[in-house]
């Protein structure tokens, strides 16, 4: 989940997803500055383990078999740029964002949001990804095909 623009991680079992008391929150996580940090989970949310920031709203994170790591896809800040990050584990450490697409603005007030991958559509073990984003001025989703090297 997102708190301001920082991304945080919670976990629960699928059969207890409706039970908020079943959730655990990541409160310590490895970062690029402190990669040796051991992940620590607690039953109460404490916004101390920012996985990464620069995410103004929705994003996706999932394991990618082609890259053999986790990837996160999101719009970077409010800069109309789509970014990808990688991490060896879902808990991190997460890489700096790498811009892979800049949507063309048609109007000066265009704002692109909700950048995310759809892992269920992947092809070639995750080498070919499908990413959507939304132009919020007209609220029309756009679909990209992204081929990783």
Image: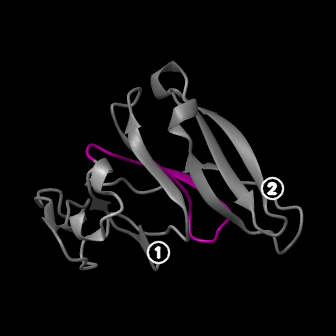
Residue 111 location in percent, x, y? 74, 69
Q: Which residue is mark 1?
A: 5
- Rendered position, 118 above or below 48: above
Residue 26 location in percent, x, y? 22, 65
Kindly indicate the quadrant of the structure image that contains residue 78: bottom right
Residue 61 location in percent, x, y? 43, 49
Residue 50 location in percent, x, y? 31, 70
Tell me the tag on residue 141: none
Q: Secondary structure at mark 1?
A: loop
Tell me the tag on residue 104: 2
The verdict on residue 143 being magenta is no
Judging depth in this view, the residue of 85 and 72 nearest the camera is 72
Q: Earlier in the sequence, mark 1 or mark 2?
A: 1
Q: Which residues are magenta?
A: 72-89
Q: Secondary structure at mark 2?
A: loop
Classify 10 Å Cα crowding around label 1: few (below 14), some (14-19), many (20 and above).
some
Alpha-carbon span between mark 1 and mark 2: 23 Å
- Rendered position, 109 above or below 126: below
Residue drawn 17% across the image and 63% down it: 34
| Label 1 close to label 2 by CB (< 8 Å) | no
């Amino acid at each position: 989940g997102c708190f301001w623009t920082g991304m945080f991680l919670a976990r629960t079992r699928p059969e207890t997803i409706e039970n908020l008391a079943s959730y655990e929150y990541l409160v310590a996580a490895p970062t690029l500055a402190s990669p040796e940090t051991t992940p620590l989970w607690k039953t109460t949310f404490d916004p101390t383990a920012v996985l990464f920031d620069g995410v103004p709203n929705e994003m996706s994170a999932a394991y990618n078999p082609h890259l053999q790591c986790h990837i996160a896809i999101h719009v970077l800040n409010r800069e109309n740029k789509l970014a990808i990050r990688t991490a060896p584990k879902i808990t991190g450490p997460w890489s700096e964002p790498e811009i892979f697409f800049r949507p063309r603005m048609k109007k000066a007030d265009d704002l692109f949001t909700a950048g995310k991958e759809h892992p269920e559509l992947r092809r070639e073990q995750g080498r070919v990804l499908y990413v959507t984003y939304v132009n919020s001025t007209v609220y029309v989703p756009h679909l990209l095909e992204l081929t990783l090297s």
